[in-house]
Amino acid sequence: MTSSLRRSFLKNLFLTSAGSLLVAGAALAQSSTGVLRVSAIPDEAPTELQRKFKPLGDYLAKATGLKVEFTPVTDYAASVEGLIQRKIDMVWFGGFTFVQANARSKGQVTPLVQRAEDEKFRSVFITTQPGINKLEDLRGKTLSFGSESSTSGHLMPRSFLLGAKVNPDTDLKRVAFSGAHDATVAAVAGGKVDAGALNMSVWEKLVEAKKVDPKVVRVFYTTPGYYDYNWTVRSDMDPALKKKITDAFLALDVSTPQGREILELQRATKFIPTKTANYGAIEAAARNAGLLK
């Protein structure tokens, strides 16, 4: 071997070895702390989010061998930034929040699983006013959405309003943002607004818990189905850890006591795999509404 060929060979060997060490180092860095930091968009009260997550966190800790910590965030934007800035490893996103995170990270986040119910999720419009019976009746009225970044509490309800030729910004007397689905119900029930839009799952949960009287606050419109929530991680997460997390969610079964408890708290019959392409319609709706640049 000539000296020039030897130098070239050694250089390539060094670069290959260095690259392998960097990849290994990145994977090691993700697991060296022994902690999986998990969060969720704050679409319900913090105490409720913690209550819902506790059994799931214990289950994921056993499945991954990591300590699982739930890290609450103050708003939807914080959940996006927390994942991108590596302060959080996995987040329960709404469809729109996922689209925002995907755009913000330039495609460096990966949705792992969603509930079967999230393939055809729905929002409801509620009111206490007898004269409001269809979306067109909201002209000149006051309406509360949830968070501005909520899929089911703002983006998709706004999209369906626009589809009914009702522009929330010009045709309504006033638009408010409650910040969370249960707060929207409280605003409508308390007479602060004429109507509200929220996640159908939260509405059903509040009715079942008798925290709202459906004879007083009633649903007057239910949207068509759309893709919504998912569990998302950064794309550079160790593939072995991604698989452990995914497999753990897919293994949840209502026929087991633990599976039934977790699935009931998550208001799911089961979890199924998901992919970025499922959220194309939400991205299009967000861009059409001017909510995603």
Image: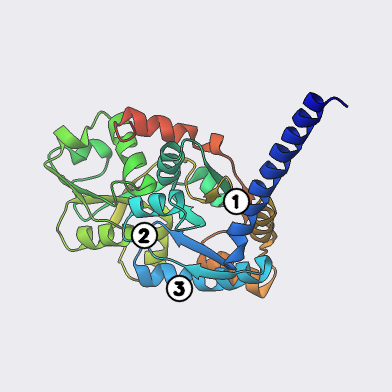
Q: Earlier in the sequence, mark 2 or mark 3?
A: 2
- Picture quarter containing residue 275? top right
The Cα–Cα distance between marks 2 and 3, rounded to whole angstroms, is: 13 Å
Q: Is residue 78 above or below residue 120?
A: below
Residue 135 in picture, x, y percent from top left: 26, 39
- The residue that disc 2 covers is 42
Identified at 34% across, 50% down, the residue is 77
Question: What SS does tag 2 mark?
Answer: loop
The residue type indicated by label 1 comes to Met
Q: Earlier in the sequence, mark 3 or mark 1?
A: 3
Q: Is residue 133 above or below residue 277?
A: below
Identified at 32% across, 52% down, the residue is 219
Which residue is more in the foreground, 13 or 257? Answer: 13
- The residue that disc 1 covers is 237
Identified at 66% across, 63% down, the residue is 252
> Taking 281 as reference, is 20 left or right?
right
Which residue is more in the foreground, 25 or 104? Answer: 25
- Picture quarter containing residue 73? bottom left
Q: Nearer the viewer, mark 3 or mark 1?
A: 1
Residue 227 in picture, x, y percent from top left: 49, 42
Q: Is residue 126 visible?
A: yes
The Cα–Cα distance between marks 3 and 1, rounded to whole angstroms, is: 27 Å
The residue type indicated by label 3 comes to Arg
Give the quadrant of the C terminus.
Answer: top left
Which residue is more in the foreground, 108 or 193? Answer: 108
Question: What SS does tag 3 mark?
Answer: helix
Residue 172 in picture, x, y percent from top left: 15, 39
Which numbered dot is residue 51? 3
Residue 220 in picture, x, y percent from top left: 30, 48
The Cα–Cα distance between marks 2 and 1, rounded to whole angstroms, is: 24 Å
Q: Nearer the viewer, mark 2 or mark 1?
A: 1
